[in-house]
């Protein structure tokens, strides 16, 4: 993945250790350590545009890939009785034709990742496994078996490159699944740990579940949204606890800016001002300039980090949660959200200004870099002339990628108010 560093010589020198007896700046004659065995873990693209399949046809998948999509998130899988089970479209009969279409295009490089959860998926795991305790390790083993079965049934299919956590809430507000209990947290964490050496592990929290603008925390998904206090399905950094327990377990943090009445939508349609909520003339459509600014702000605050007050929950001290740029992915809605009025429930960002924001990069303590990219929901609803992926790809490909360019942009053009 693209990452700018002011210390380019360090990895070069480190690589030379494999053939020389002296390290970078270090004397001595210590023997070169034996090389580590090669990792079987799949490699993410250097810049990512991903789409959730949502039952998309091979034709729709092929068109999305032509427009720039290079990672597919297959939705959805579920936990049931220490086994993973899928929706009706999660089988070789559906996946096989999609993979064949990609092979015919010469695009075997496209990664496939299996997503767990989704809205309305119950996730109170305790007590559902009979006499055997529910176990993240057991679910990990079940995923491995499912993956091998799919590989055996689809000629040439390399298997799923990883898993993705998309547990959210339920329409029934009083549902016990509108909060994360410890059994669910433990199963998610332990499954992630069990698979992380061999597979990509992703989380895709709605923005309020991983909100770098708020230091509060609890495990409830029944909080009021900023832009509509009557909408009580927001979270309070519920996914931040999972990430803080094992940051190294997660390769991707894909924040859903399209969450219902998200903070990003509040900024875009209400100008981020409490006084505009309920005020005549508001909400109103956002401009492309606002879109670019808001995308950049959200990338920057995740990379810089923010304090989360866990107050001992799950043994977590109050701490700064920081996401490295190479793990950061902004989650967008495609054209199904293109006309937000009259409710302005879903934030809609155009591909052009979003890609331009990506080009600006983010500033970190170690220098400057660009984030990994974008994902969108949902590929199955791409319209015939839809262009979100294509516009993202065009904008991301058009900007310069040199170290000097990114560092100059960050040093001279990112104003202090963007460095949240």
Image: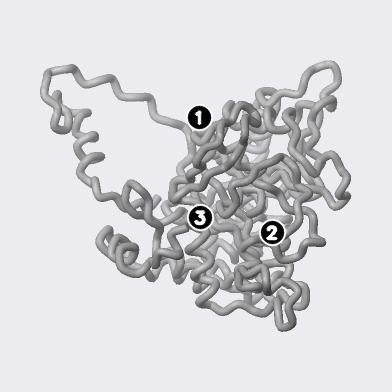
Mark 1 touching mark 2, by CB under 8 A?
no
What residue is shown with label 3?
Answer: 107
Separation (CA) of disc 3 from disc 2:
31 Å
Q: Residue furthest front?
A: 275
Q: Earlier in the sequence, mark 3 or mark 2?
A: 3
Give the answer, above or below, for where 397 lies relative to 217: below
Q: Earlier in the sequence, mark 1 or mark 3?
A: 3
Separation (CA) of disc 1 from disc 3:
25 Å
The residue positioned 34% from the left and 63% from the top of the image is 410
Whole-percent x and y of residue 356? 44, 70
Give the answer, above or below, for where 266 lies relative to 372: below
Numbered badge on residue 32: none
From the viewer's perspective, is 142 left or right of 387?
right
What residue is shown with label 2?
Answer: 259
What residue is shown with label 1?
Answer: 197
Whole-percent x and y of residue 150? 66, 38
Mark 3 touching mark 2, by CB under 8 A?
no
Separation (CA) of disc 1 from disc 2:
30 Å
Whole-percent x and y of residue 381? 71, 66
The residue positioned 71% from the left and 23% from the top of the image is 135
Visible in this render: residue 91? Answer: no
**Secondary structure type for disc 2:** loop
The residue positioned 88% from the left and 50% from the top of the image is 172
* Disc 3 residue crowd, few under 14, some 14–19, many 20+, Cα 10 Å: some
Visible in this render: residue 292? Answer: yes
**Secondary structure type for disc 1:** loop
């Amino acid at each position: 993945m693209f990452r700018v560093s002011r210390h380019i010589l360090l990895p070069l020198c480190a690589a030379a250790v494999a053939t020389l007896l002296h390290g970078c700046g270090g004397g001595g004659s210590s023997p070169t350590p034996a090389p580590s065995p090669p990792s079987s873990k799949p490699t993410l693209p250097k810049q990512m545009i991903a789409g959730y399949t949502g039952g998309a046809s091979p034709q729709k998948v092929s068109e999305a890939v032509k427009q720039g999509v290079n990672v597919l998130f297959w939705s959805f899988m579920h936990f049931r009785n220490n086994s993973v089970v899928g929706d009706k479209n999660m089988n070789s009969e559906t996946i096989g034709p999609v993979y064949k279409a990609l092979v015919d295009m010469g695009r075997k490089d496209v990664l496939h990742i299996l997503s767990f959860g989704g809205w309305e998926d119950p996730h109170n795991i305790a007590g559902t496994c009979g006499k055997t305790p529910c176990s993240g390790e057991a679910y990990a083993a079940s995923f491995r078996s499912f993956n091998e079965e799919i590989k055996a049934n689809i000629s040439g299919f390399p298997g799923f490159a990883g898993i993705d956590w998309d547990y959210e809430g339920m329409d029934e507000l009083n549902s016990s699944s509108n909060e994360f209990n410890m059994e669910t947290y433990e199963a998610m964490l332990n499954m992630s740990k069990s698979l992380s050496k061999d597979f990509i592990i992703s989380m895709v929290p709605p923005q309020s579940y991983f909100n770098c603008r708020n230091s509060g925390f609890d495990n409830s998904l029944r909080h009021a949204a900023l832009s509509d206090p009557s909408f009580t399905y927001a979270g309070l950094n519920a996914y931040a606890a999972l990430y803080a327990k094992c940051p190294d377990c997660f390769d991707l943090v894909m924040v859903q800016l399209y969450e219902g009445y998200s903070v990003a939508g509040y900024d875009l349609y209400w100008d981020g001002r409490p006084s505009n909520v309920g005020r005549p003339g508001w909400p109103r459509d956002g401009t492309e300039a606002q879109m670019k600014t808001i995308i950049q702000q959200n990338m920057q605050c995740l990379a810089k980090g923010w304090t989360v007050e866990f107050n001992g929950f799950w043994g977590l001290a109050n701490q700064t949660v920081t996401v490295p740029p190479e793990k950061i992915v902004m989650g967008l809605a495609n054209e199904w959200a293109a006309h937000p009025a009259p409710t302005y429930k879903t934030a809609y960002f155009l591909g052009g200004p979003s890609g331009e924001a990506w080009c600006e990069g983010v500033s970190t303590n170690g220098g400057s870099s660009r984030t990994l990219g974008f994902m969108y929901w949902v590929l199955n609803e791409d319209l015939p002339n839809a262009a979100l992926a294509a516009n993202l790809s065009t904008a991301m490909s058009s900007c310069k990628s040199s170290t000097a360019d990114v560092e100059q942009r960050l040093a001279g053009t990112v104003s202090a108010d963007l460095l949240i």
